[in-house]
Image (cartoon, rainbow, N blue to C red):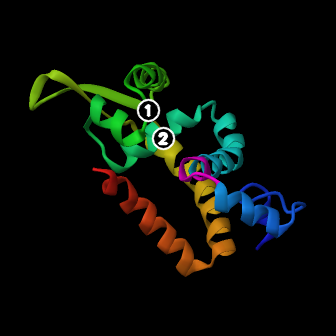
Amino acid sequence: MSKQLASGLQPDPARSPDAASREHATASLALLLKRTEHALRKRLQPTLDAEDLFFEQWQVLVVLAENPGMRMTEVADVAVVPAATLTRHMDKLVERALVIRRIDPADKRRVVVALSPMGVGLVTRIRVTEQTIEASLATGLGADRYQELVRELTLAPHLFD
């Protein structure tokens, strides 16, 4: 595996491969996913810090980049951010002019949100760093295994329904 990957996306290279294998063989899926998220956050956080963003705000921005005009409840679900937390983060993103809130034309009782032009620019800049991290993971796993991982992680949440 590459040294880049060792810096945050795999177990400490100082530990023996046998110890890492035993750890992964006994770890719960929830714990493995949480460790992977933690490693990703650790690599992305300096970029987010430079932009004065929390990881959860980044999740919201990415969701809005892919799905403009979503209702707040949909954003909370897709971004995996609790509704109360989402409201607080969304207020900050609107205050910073990264997100625009509007009344839903289809249902005047609801609010829809989308990225502002400034928000689009910010997401574009941060995605460069995120794509570099993803490329490092793809290099460590190999392109085919990486694509399979992405495919499986995309399908997995739907298997719980």
Q: Are marks 2 and 1 in contact (CB under 8 Å)?
A: yes
Q: Which residue does the image show at 45% across and 27% down from the upper left?
A: 97
Q: Dot 2 corresponds to which residue?
A: 59
Q: x, y percentage for residue 34?
A: 60, 46
Q: x, y percentage for residue 130?
A: 59, 55
Determine whether, in the image, residue 146 is placed left or right of residue 93. Answer: right
Q: Is residue 132 above or below residue 138?
A: above
Q: In the rendered structure, which segment of residues is drawn in magenta? A: 27-32
* Sequence order check, earlier mark of 2 and 1: 2
Q: Dot 1 corresponds to which residue?
A: 81
Q: Is residue 160 above or below residue 145?
A: above
Residue 3 appearing in the image = no
Residue 31 magenta-highlighted? yes
Q: Which residue does the image show at 68% across and 41% down from the upper left?
A: 45
Dot 2: within a 10 Å radius of its alpha carbon, few (fewer than 14), some, or many (20 or more) residues? some
Q: x, y percentage for residue 158?
A: 31, 55
The amino acid beneath tag 1 is Val
Q: Nearer the viewer, mark 2 or mark 1?
A: 1
Alpha carbons under labels 2 and 1: distance apart: 8 Å
Front-lying residue, 99 or 7: 7
Front-lying residue, 151 or 88: 151
Helix, strand, or loop for circle 2?
A: helix
The amino acid beneath tag 2 is Gln
